[in-house]
Image (cartoon, rainbow, N blue to C red):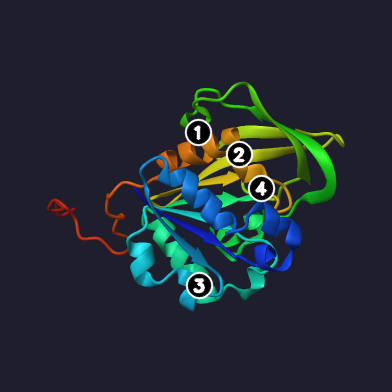
Amino acid sequence: MNVTVWNEYRHEKENATVQNIYPDGIHQTIAEFLQEEGHQVKTAILDEVEHGLTEEVLAETDVLIWWGHKAHDEVKEEIAERVKQRVLAGMGLIVLHSGHFSKVFKKLMGTTCDLKWREADDKERLWVADPSHPITAGLGEYIELEKEEMYGEHFDIPAPDEVVFISWFEGGEVFRSGTTFKRGNGKIFYFRPGHETYSTYHNREIQQVIKNAVNWVAGSNRARPVYGNAKPLEQIAEKG
């Protein structure tokens, strides 16, 4: 599997707390545990040419993982559209945490993707809402995180194809924290946990979810359907 992990890579360079948790960047932490699965993993960051997402890179990518937060507006429209088109063509996409507000995710959802949020060291309990789903393989009934940023409903997304995880937060809110969508030939998984000031991506259960999700969203090599005016497959009888 060819996986590309994309990250803004801003917080890690500007915030000492984040740098201490992810000294080489969130993207490298994710890349390392995916390499344990035998995947071929590349990383790309915002400040690279074409944000590291050239036509060539995306053409070779089976699954793209996206983490963004403070610099969504700096992502060029043409790059976001390029990623969208690759998803429609069959590339798998995993959108993490604050990537819900990315241009890529909003283009694919067609909604504001807005929500409630709070940074107050809430305990989070991610309940497995679909125990038969491949993304939940190897997990218990829930994942518990002692500290995370709260995201609360209403989450302004289209009705998901599947709700895989539902979160409860210590402050009382709930959230659809693991949702799947199909767009064109591509599959998308949105996964909520992962605020930069917490060590969430070092958690083995969170890593297991992402590993499972890579396998689930991976696209087939099936060609996209042909659209537009179509010639008949058989001769159409004259009507008289």
Name the element at disc 1. Answer: helix
Tell me whether the residue at label 1 lies in contact with that at label 2, contact meaning CB atoms closer than 8 angstroms: yes
Percent across and percent down for residue 29 are 55, 51
- Image quadrant where residue 145 sits: top right
C-alpha distance separating marks 3 and 4: 21 Å
What is the number of the mark on residue 178?
2
Q: Residues within 10 Å of mark 3 (few under 14, many from 20)?
A: some
- Image quadrant where residue 109 sits: bottom right
- The residue under label 3 is 51
Vertical order, 212 against 35 (above or below): above
Is 123 on the left-hand or right-hand side of 83?
Answer: right
What is the number of the mark on residue 135?
1
| Three-letter code for the amino acid on which mark 1 is drawn | Ile
- The residue under label 4 is 194
Percent across and percent down for residue 67 are 59, 57
Q: Nearer the viewer, mark 1 or mark 4?
A: 4
Vertical order, 50 against 10 (above or below): below
Percent across and percent down for residue 22 are 63, 54
Q: Residues within 10 Å of mark 4 (few under 14, many from 20)?
A: some
Q: Mark 2 vs mark 3: which is more N-terminal?
A: 3
